[in-house]
């Protein structure tokens, strides 16, 4: 995951390289359920999303409802969850890292031609 200072700048960089930015306002995500809901909303998860860590990983490594290419999840204000519930933050961040790795070129789920980049921002 790449820490960046500003969500707008991260979105501009994603667009400039042909990626699809998906901005998540994490300021209101202060527990695991609300953080997963915010991720699901940002990436337009299907209704079958089960709101648990396994389902989060499954959706993140599928993304077949989105166009092919790089999808950049920009988590603005991720520190809100980190401060409110450090354990939930670490769990979700771990799933995000695992999914990003699985969808990277050469990853075990890269065949669907959808790639995930996760960016954490301060604002």
Image (tube, rainbow, N blue to C red):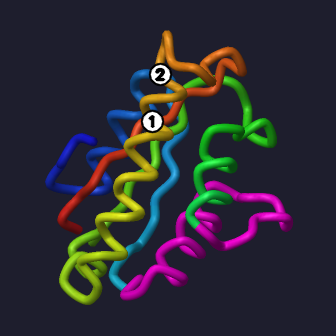
The residue under the point 67% across, 59% down is 55
Residue 54: name its quadrant.
bottom right
Image height of 113 relative to 23, above or below: above
Residue 97 drawn at (x, y percent):
38, 43
Answer few, some or many: residues within 10 Å of disc 2's Cα (few below 14, many 20 plus, some between 14 and 19).
Answer: some
> Is 40 on the left or on the right of 32, as rendered?
right
User: In what quadrant of the picture does the N terminus appear?
Assistant: top left
Secondary structure under badge 1? helix
Q: Nearer the viewer, residue 107 or 25?
A: 107
Q: Nearer the viewer, residue 123 or 33?
A: 33
The CA distance from mark 1 to mark 2 is 6 Å
- Tell me where the magenta segment starts and ends, as one range: 29-52
Reading the image, the residue beneath label 1 is 100
Q: Position of residue 80 (x, y in %)?
A: 26, 81
Do the numbered discs 1 and 2 sit on residues whose CB atoms are within 8 Å? yes
Q: Where is mark 2, residue-wise?
A: 104
Residue furthest toward the left?
A: 5
């Amino acid at each position: 995951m790449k820490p960046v200072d500003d969500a707008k700048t991260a979105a501009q960089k994603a667009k400039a390289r042909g990626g699809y930015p998906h901005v998540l306002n994490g300021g209101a995500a202060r527990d695991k359920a609300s953080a997963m809901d915010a991720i699901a909303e940002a990436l337009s998860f299907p209704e079958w999303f089960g709101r648990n860590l396994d389902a989060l990983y499954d959706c993140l490594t599928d993304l077949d409802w989105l166009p092919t290419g790089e999808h950049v999840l920009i988590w603005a204000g991720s520190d809100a969850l980190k401060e409110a519930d450090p354990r939930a933050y670490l769990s979700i961040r771990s799933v995000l890292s695992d999914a990003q790795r699985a969808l990277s070129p050469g990853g075990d789920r890269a065949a669907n031609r959808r790639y995930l980049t996760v960016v954490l921002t301060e604002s």
